[in-house]
Image (cartoon, coloured by chain):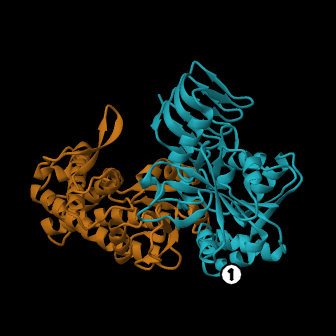
Chain colours: A cyan, B orange
Amino acid sequence: MHAFILAGGFATRLWPLTEKRAKPLLPLAGKPILTHIVEKIPEDIAVTVSTNAVFKEGFEEWKQSLNRSNIEILIEDTNHDDQKLGALGAVAQWVKDANIDDDILLLTGDNYIGFDLKEFIKAYKSNALLATHDIKDLERAKSFGTVILDENRKRNVSSFEEKPTNPKSTLVSTGCSILPANTLPILIEYAKEHPDNVGGIFEELLRKNQTVECFTFSDLWFDIGSFDAYLEATRALVGDRIIAEDGASYGETQIEESVVLGQRSKVTKSTLKNVVLFEDCTVEDCELTNCILDHHCELKGVDLVGKMIRENTKLVQEN
Amino acid sequence: MRPKILLTLWLLSDIALFIGVYALAYFLRVGFIFSTDFPFSQYITIVAIVSPLWIIVLATTRTFHMTRNQISMRNLAYISYAALVGLALFSLTYFFKYTTFFSRLLLIYAFILTTFATYIWHIVFQNIQRRVLSAGSPAFPTLIVGATRESRKLVESLIKKRNPLCPVAILDGRGAPDKEIAGVPVLGKLNKLEEVLEQKKITHLIQCSDLEQSLNLLSACRQRKITYLLLPSVLGIVERDEHTESLEGLPVTMVSANKRWWKWFF
C-alpha cells in the first residue's frame, strides 16, 4: 500500500493565513495538520504528498522536520488556482507517472481524523474502502460527499452523492479512503473528465458495479476548510487549557478556553479566549476573542473578535 | 515624479494668477493707466508679498489634493473662502505698510476675479493634470478589492474621468465570476494580493467589499506604503450622508441622518 495525500489547494477561504503557507501546514494544537495525519500512517507505508509549486519550500522544510524517510513531496507544476490539475487529476497523473500498481491510501491534507489509521487499514479487505462519519446535520451534509448504506449489507455503500442539494443521509465521506490497485484504471479514465471530483470516483466505482465498503467512526473529525472550522478543531483538540510552545510567555494574562501560543510569542496584560498565535507574536494590553494571528504580529491596546490577522501586522494603539 | 512637478507648476501658476487678477482689478478700477495717486508698483508689491500666504490658505482647504474634484460647489466655496482671506491679508498688509486705504470697489473686483479665475483655472489644470498622469504608464496604479456593483460604478467613473487613481486590477474575496470590469482585469481572490501589489506596483488600494479583511488589507498597505481608501458602503453607509469628524481628538466617520442643507460646506 502507498499513501497519497492531497495538499495542492490554495485555501483562499483561510486567507491571509494561507497567503504563504499551504493549508495542511497550518499549525493545529501545536503541530501542522499534515503532521497529525502522517503520524497516524504506519511507518512501513510510503507517503507521497502532492502540492503545487507555490508552497514547495514550505513542504520541503516540513519534510526535513520529520523523522521519517519514506516521504516524497510531489510538486504539481502550477502557480495559480486556475492552472491546477485538480485533486483527482493529480492522483491520476501520479499513478501514471510513477507506474503505481499498488493499493492507495488516499487522504486529504486538510482533514483532521481522530481514529487510528491502523484500524482502518485492518478493515480493508479487497474492495474500495471509505471512512465515513455521521455529522447528524442534514444542512451541513450539503457541503460533503454523502453516503447511503446498503440496507442488507450495512458495511457496503449503496450510493454516494458529492455535495448534494438535498442530502438523504448525514453520513459523510471524510477525505480518507483506500482504492484497490484494480480500480486505478477506472480512476485514470474518470479523472480525464472530472479532474476536480475526488468524491465522484466512488460514484463511478458504484456505477461500474464495484463494491465500495464503509468504515464508520465516531472519533473526532474536522474538515479544516474555513476560519470557523479551524477554530472549532483547535478548541476540540486543545480543550480548556493553554499550549505554550518553546519560548512563549504570558504574564498578567487571563486565559479562557483554548489558547495556543507559538514559539517565542509573548503576551502581557491581556485577555485571550480561543486564540491561536503563531510564532514571534507580541500582544500587550489586548482583549482577543476567537482570533488567529500569523507570525510576527504586534498588537498593543486593541480589542479584536473573530479575526485572522496576516503576518507582520502591527496594530499599536498610541497613548 | 510627474505628480510633484505638476503640483509645483500648479502652485506657481496659482501665484501668478493671484498677482495677475489683482493687477487686472487695479486696471479695471483705475483705468488702463498707472495712477500717481495710487501707485501700481506699491500695490503689486503688496500683492506679491501676500500671494504665498494666500496659497497656504488655499492649500489648507485641500484643493490641491489629487482626489479633490475641482468641479464642485464645495470646491468653489473653499476657493471663495480663500479669496476672501487673501483679500483681508492684502488690505491689512497694505494698510500696515502705507497707513492708507484705497478703493473699496477694487476689493470687490479682486475678490470676484480671484474666486472665479482660480476656480476656472483649477478645472483647466485638473484636466491637464489628469491627461498627463494617465498618459503612458499610470502614475498611481490602483487596486480595487471587491467586484460589486458599487466598485463597477467606481471603476467606470475613474476611467471615464481620467482620474489619477487608475484601476489596474481587481481582486474579490469571494471569487467573482467576471474576468474583467470595464476593461480592468479581475485577477482572482485575495490570495493573489501580494503578487498583484508587487507586479502591478500598486500605489493605492480601494476597498469596496470584504469588510472582514480590512485589517489585513490595511496591514498589507502599511507594509508597502500604499495608500488605503475605503468606500463607505463597505460599512453600510450608502446614503452619502457621512463625513469625517473628530471626537476628543480621534478621527471618526459620522453619519447624520437629519443633516441640514448648509452642512455640505462644513
Could you say where residue A247 lies in the image, as x and y percent from the top left? 73, 29
Which residue occupies the extreme right position in the image? A69
- Is B139 left or right of A71, judged from the image as shown? left
A251 or B80, nearer to the observer = A251
Query: Mark 1 belongs to which amino acid?
Result: Glu
- Is B151 left or right of B110, judged from the image as shown? right
The residue at the point 14 percent across, 66 percent down is: B30
Per the image, the residue denoted by label 1 is A189
Residue B154 in which image quadrant:
bottom left
* Label 1: which secondary element: helix
Could you say where residue A154 lies in the image, as x and y percent from the top left? 59, 56
Mark yes or no: residue B1 visible.
no
The residue at the point 37 percent across, 66 percent down is: B148
Could you say where residue B88 lies in the image, as x and y percent from the top left? 21, 48
- Is A35 left or right of B192, judged from the image as shown? right
Q: In which quarter of the image is the N terminus of chain A?
A: bottom right
